[in-house]
Amino acid sequence: MLITGIKSRPVYDRLQPMTGGLRHLIAGQGSGGAAMLRLIADMSPSQRQHSTLLYSTESFSGHDHLQALRELKVAGLEVFPSNQALIEALARKLNEAHMGTRLYLSGSESFIGTAMQAANAVDLNRDEVLREHSGTLVRRVWCAHCDTYTENVTHRVFTCPGCQLDLVVRDHYSRRLAAFQGIKADGEVPGELPAAEELDT
Amino acid sequence: MNTHNGTLSVRVTRIEQLTPEIKRFTLNDPQGKHLPAFSGGSHVVVVLEEGEKTYRNAYSLMSSPYDSSAYQIAVRRVDTGRGGSRLLHDQVREGALLQILQPANLFPLAKHARQHLFIAGGVGITPVYSQLEELQLKQATFELHLAVRGPEHTALGLELKARYGEKVHLYVQGQAARMDIRGILAARPLGSHVYVCGPDSMIDDTLDSAHALGWTDSHIHYERFVEQGSTGQPFSVTLARQGVTIEVPAEQSLLEAAEQAGYQVPYLCRGGACGYCETEVLEVEGELDHRDDWLSEEDKLGKRKFMPCVSRANCSRLVVDL
């Protein structure tokens, strides 16, 4: 059931200016701020003037690039205390944005995945979005039994906070749910749990 | 339905003269059965025999994808063409049987679009007909901008205006302002898609305007009036799988010459657009004359790939994997 080499996990990019775009939305979180700073440095003055930054200070690893981001000469910087708040604001901006807008995402897999749900809702395609992963590959897990999402899962077996079942984290990433699938760990033989190894974070 | 060697026999049950150049043909199964289903933007290839010659012309299906009791195609008479449209206009009467190939779709709708914009010129409106039927049923947001050359060419545009009202914008040359493609595409919400079918200048204008406004290629869809087949200098070609060398005469394409020699080559659009007949060049001494819209510039320069439906060669030797 557990496979190695996760084919369903997205292949991430390196952020670089998308030259055809007229407006640039750059959203990042925690340690993803470093990629945002590098992207802005690579941009032309005109691209910077048409760039809006969204930054969430929520971080699993404790990285914070807010001070450096504040010093950039861009069209705007909006700061959010949580990834959830940022993604809600991003969804509103995308809903009002025009063709010609490019989206750049940097941060954890959970952040990028949930931001992509907002991007997919407005039919942004692969030639309009770049995603750069930063930090660890801790997993966001969806419980197949009670529909609860759990952030920052690092071990193969964990207890779902929603239904208290012991779940095994499968190596299958759902882009639609932006999460790995978790299923009852001892479903085959009650009481027989798989090894509680550390995930490839 | 009757199929014979992959073709479908249909009866012409109605012919309408819509404009001075365009006739609409309604096609039914001879036994009154249902025809194969199709999706918006599909076309059929009509196979016409005239003496020694065989024409295979692609025409968009303009009937509803939700009604498989009949197909409709519109045929513009092209006097300077190779003869297929003249034959349909002059020889084919109501009641006649035609051979067609099963529908194929090289111009499908973008399923996740938030808004669909259609830009069409003249007979380029035909693939849009079935697409609008599909979008209307799905209650999707769409707009059509159609340009025609004069009041005598407005029949299809008026028919669509009666059906879809304000969503249809008709530009009649000499009567109203010209279509402003850049203006149509400006300030559209994310997730908009544009589909353009018409003369090359209209397609190029749409591509340039969209790119200037920052649109990416995944949101731009176009279908050129493909010039089927090709003419030029004769050349000879070796079909490696058949182990034969055939001559391609001045007025035929490699595909047509191979068919006439009795070899079956897979094809769809016959106009260098769809990529279905792409073949590998095994040996070449000389220059290839690529005439398709399918291969990338890199592929064309690489001399490894070739489109038998339209491309030609100026070679002392050419071996292809057919």
Image (cartoon, rainbow, N blue to C red):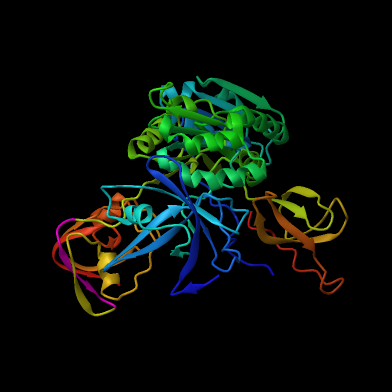
Residue drawn at point x = 61 percent, y = 26 percent:
A66
Asked if residue B234 can be seen in this view, the reply is yes
Q: On the picture, is A69 further left or further right than A192?
A: left
Instruction: Say which residue appears at 49% left-offset and 23% top-offset.
Output: A50
Is A193 in front, or is B276? B276
On-image quarter of the C terminus of chain B: bottom left
x, y percent for residue A182 = 76, 58
Q: Is residue B167 above or below residue B276?
A: above
Estimate the x, y position of residue A148 in percent, counting from the top left. 81, 50
Identify which residue, A157 or B294, lies in the foreground.
B294
**Image position, residue B246 (x, y; %):** 20, 73
- Residue B61, position in %: x, y? 50, 52
Q: Indicate whether residue B239 is drawn in magenta.
A: yes
- Residue A120 shown left or right of residue B117 in the figure: right
- Dividing the image into 4 quarters, which one contains the N terminus of chain B? bottom right
Query: Which residue sits furthest left?
Result: B316
Of the pair A64 and B195, the residue shown nearer to us: B195
Q: Is residue A103 visible?
A: no
Residue lying furthest bottom in this view?
B243
- How many numbered marks does the figure carry? 0
Q: Is residue A73 left or right of residue B304?
A: right
Q: Which residues are magenta?
A: B232-241
Above or below, A153 relative to B258:
above
- Residue nearest the observer in this picture, B23 or A86: B23
Choose top left, top right, bottom left or bottom right for residue B217: top left
A186 in magenta: no
